[in-house]
Image (cartoon, grey):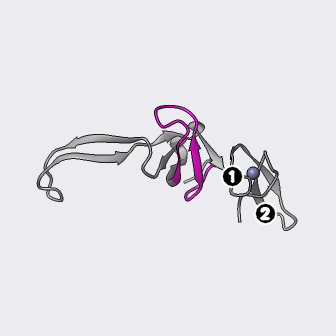
Amino acid sequence: MASKKLHVKKNDMVMIIAGKDKGKTGKVMRVLADKGRVVVESLNVVKRHSRPTRANAEGGIIEKEAPLAASNVLLLCGACNKPTRTGIRILDDGSKARFCKKCNEIVDK
Ligand SMILES: [Zn+2]
């Protein structure tokens, strides 16, 4: 499967810049690259009514993180601690790394 690259990756800290959780920060749990969406830990939580299943005999309301459009999140830079857009820089060894457009620090380790 060809993977499209998003500007955020799993385990990135991000800030939400639109919608009901605007301004909140959290950790990326999952990236749905082909859909352009990300799931952020404990943000954009929706309540779902579930029917009883074998795994959950009671059914009832479950709370679950819904995927957000990746364009609605910005990476939180670990160096300057601000939500930022990233660019791609080619390192001396030929590998690519993302850098913070605010402070110019490499954000990939
Ligand atoms: Zn920065």
Q: Is residue 105 above or below residue 15?
A: below
The residue pinned by badge 2 equals: 95
The residue pinned by badge 1 equals: 81
- Residue at 57% across, 36% down: 72
- Residue at 51% across, 41% down: 35
Q: Which quadrant of the rendered structure holds the N terminus? A: bottom right
Quarter-of-image position of residue 84: top right
Q: Is residue 70 above or below residue 5?
A: above
Across and down, in percent, residue 56 comes to 17, 56
> Does the beta carbon at disc 1 come under 8 Å from ligand 1?
yes
Magenta range is: 8-27
Asked if the stretch drawn in magenta spans residue 70, the answer is no
Q: CA distance from mark 1 to mark 2?
A: 24 Å
Q: Amino acid at mark 1?
A: Asn
Q: Which quadrant of the rendered structure holds the C terminus? A: bottom right
Few, some or many C-alpha atoms within 10 Å of disc 1 (few <14, some 14-19, many ≥20)?
Answer: few
Q: Is residue 71 above or below residue 94?
A: above
Few, some or many C-alpha atoms within 10 Å of disc 2 (few <14, some 14-19, many ≥20)?
Answer: few
